[in-house]
């Protein structure tokens, strides 16, 4: 469920723009942005093309809105998982990687929407790619900061190692359905952290 859908009063009909965003988010995540056409989005959302184009100038703008929504949801999840462990950066990282490992077991898991969008759009100027890269740079910065707060001998190396494990999990979880390397993410991260402190 998207952030837009969460704030909608259940007694009121959802606005067309909210239905468009929710539908696009579901289809883009499950199948990829390029695979989904505007016609399918409006049909599935139960709206008209003019409704979509009043809210979004183009499919590229809708893709950028999807990435912005995904980014917000991503950091909300990150904060929800790490906040209970405030002041203990090792526990924060371990809780986060366990949450990722748990997510990989969800049926039809498709990895990280940001990573998928960045791979899907090699053009560095495409808004979906630009926004995805910004998310990954912030992700890297946060993991390095947590590694520094842990007292790692080389915090940049530990932060980058954690990011590589996580990104590998996003990809491998799509290849091995529930029994691949992703099931060892938390243990591998713990071993990497222990070796780095």
Image (spheres, rainbow, N blue to C red):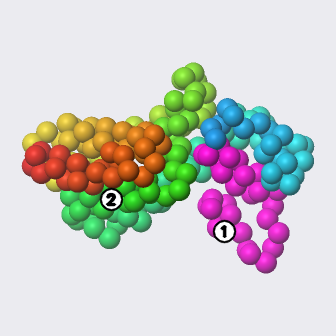
Specify few, some or many for label 2: CA neighbours under 10 Å numbering under 14, 14-19, or 20 or more.
some
Task: Estimate the x, y position of residue 139 in percent, counting from the top left.
Answer: 38, 44
Q: Is residue 22 left or right of residue 182?
A: right
Q: Is residue 21 magenta?
A: yes
Task: Estimate the x, y position of residue 70 in percent, counting from the top left.
Answer: 56, 50
The magenta span reads 1-30
Observer-side mark, 2 or 1, equals 2
Q: Which mark is residue 7?
A: 1
How many numbered discs, if any? 2
User: Which is nearer the eye, 55 or 129?
Assistant: 129
Examine the image and state in which quarter residue 50 appears. Answer: top right
Q: Is residue 35 left or right of residue 11?
A: left
Q: Is residue 19 magenta?
A: yes
Task: Estimate the x, y position of residue 157 in percent, counting from the top left.
Answer: 20, 36
Task: Estimate the x, y position of residue 129 in percent, counting from the top left.
Answer: 55, 31
One can see residue 49 in this view: yes
Q: Residue at x 31, y 38 (%)?
A: 164
Q: Secondary structure at mark 1?
A: helix
Examine the image and state in which quarter residue 84 appears. Answer: bottom left
Q: CA distance from mark 2 to mark 1?
A: 28 Å
Q: Residue at x 27, y 37 (%)?
A: 160
Mark 2, residue position:
98
Quick check: 17 above or below 7?
A: above
């Amino acid at each position: 469920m998207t952030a837009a859908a969460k704030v909608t009063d259940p007694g009121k009909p959802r606005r067309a723009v909210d239905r468009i965003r929710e539908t696009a988010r579901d289809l883009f995540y499950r199948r990829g942005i390029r695979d989904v056409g505007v016609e399918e989005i409006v049909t599935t959302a139960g709206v008209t093309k003019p409704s979509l184009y009043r809210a979004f100038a183009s499919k590229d703008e809708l893709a950028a809105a999807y990435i912005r929504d995904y980014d917000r949801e991503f950091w909300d999840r990150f904060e929800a998982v790490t906040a209970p462990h405030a002041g203990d950066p090792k526990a924060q990282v371990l809780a986060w990687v366990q949450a990722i490992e748990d997510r990989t077991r969800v049926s039809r898991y498709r990895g990280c929407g940001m990573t998928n969008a960045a791979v899907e759009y090699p053009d560095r100027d495409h808004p979906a790619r630009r926004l995805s890269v910004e998310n990954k740079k912030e992700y890297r910065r946060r993991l390095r900061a947590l590694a520094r707060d842990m007292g790692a001998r080389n915090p940049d190396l530990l932060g980058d190692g954690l990011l590589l494990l996580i990104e590998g999990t996003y990809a491998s979880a799509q290849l091995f359905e529930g029994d691949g390397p992703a099931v060892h993410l938390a243990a591998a991260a713990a071993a990497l952290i222990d070796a780095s402190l």
